[in-house]
Amino acid sequence: MGIGIYAEVERQQYKTLEGVFLAPSIILILLGIILFVVSFIGVLGSLRDNITLLNVFMYTLAVCLLLELVGAILGLVFRKQAETLLNKNIRKGIVNYYDDLDFKNIMDYVQKRFKCCGGEEFQDWKVNMYHNCSAPGPLACGVPYTCCVTTTANEVPNTMCGYKALDDKHQPLPEIYRRGCTNAFIYWLLDNYKIMVILLFLILVPQFFGVIVTRIYITRVDDLSNEYVQPTEEVVLRQKGRLDKWFKCMPEWD
């Protein structure tokens, strides 16, 4: 949450656009608040042996775990719809590429890291007012330099290497990455499925373990509470047996 607040303060200083497409700092703050509240309830419930708070913590954790599983399953089942929605949002971000520093940094990193260009395809950059072929500036009909093919000897490409890349009449096409970043990212996930399985395991297992341990702890607290409130027959007999060893003249327990 602290990192999110710091990032948001920095973002506000340089933001020139009122409506933000993607703000990682906001996401970090929201996640931080949720984790803090849930963890605080769990800690307070365990310190006070409060079954109500422990139940709230356990069910909240279980709901989060269930939502993550459902989200992953729905993402696989409705993969095409998810890709369409993602591409639509990426195009919205491309419209404000030079005004939204957060999105610009993320898009530049993704395009360089996965060797791709745009969302669905490199032609997505036509929606940007500076890269549209009708724009008067030098970026017209071009793509950002992060779309350009790089080599080991030339890791920093010419900023104008994507010039005229969006011009349908221009031949040959400049040396840019042709595939969209959505497909590039999906193929990367498929190629590195072992890493994703391990990552998913590390995320879900601790939550599942937390739900189980909390349930056991609640049961234990409940048993102890019942023993002190109204001793069961088993507890009474156990106590009587211990007392009889020391006090032979103790009366019979009803």
Image: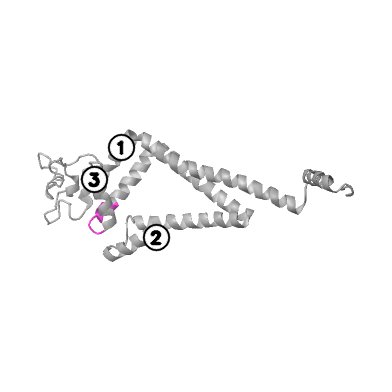
Q: Specify the quadrant of the image occupied by residue 71.
A: top left
The residue that appears at 66% across and 50% down in the rendered structure is 221
Mark 2 vs mark 3, CA separation in Å: 29 Å
Question: Dot 3 surroundings within 10 Å: few (below 14), some, or many (20 or more)?
Answer: many
Mark 3 vs mark 1, CA separation in Å: 13 Å
Mark 1 vs mark 2, CA separation in Å: 31 Å
Identify the residue under disc 1: 188
Q: Specify the quadrant of the image occupied by residue 177.
A: top left
Residue 174 locus on image (x, y percent)? 12, 42
Q: Residue furthest left?
A: 171
The one nearer the camera, 155 or 227, is 227
Q: Specify the quadrant of the image occupied by residue 5.
A: bottom left
User: Which mark's residue is nearer the viewer, 2 or 3?
Assistant: 2
In the displayed structure, does residue 204 sit left or right of residue 220? left
Classify the position of the N terminus by image quarter. Answer: bottom left
Of callouts 2 and 3, which one flags the residue occurring earlier in the amino acid sequence? 2
Of callouts 3 and 1, which one flags the residue occurring earlier in the amino acid sequence? 3
In the displayed structure, does residue 164 sit left or right of residue 229? left
Residue type at mark 1: give it. Trp
The residue that appears at 24% across and 45% down in the rendered structure is 111
Residue 210 locus on image (x, y percent)? 53, 46
Identify the residue under disc 3: 111
Kind of element beneath mark 1: helix
Residue 158 locus on image (x, y percent)? 11, 48
Q: Are marks 1 and 2 in contact (CB under 8 Å)?
A: no
Residue type at mark 2: give it. Gly
Which portion, as a residue range, is magenta? 92-99
Kind of element beneath mark 3: helix
Residue 106 appears in the picture as rendered: yes
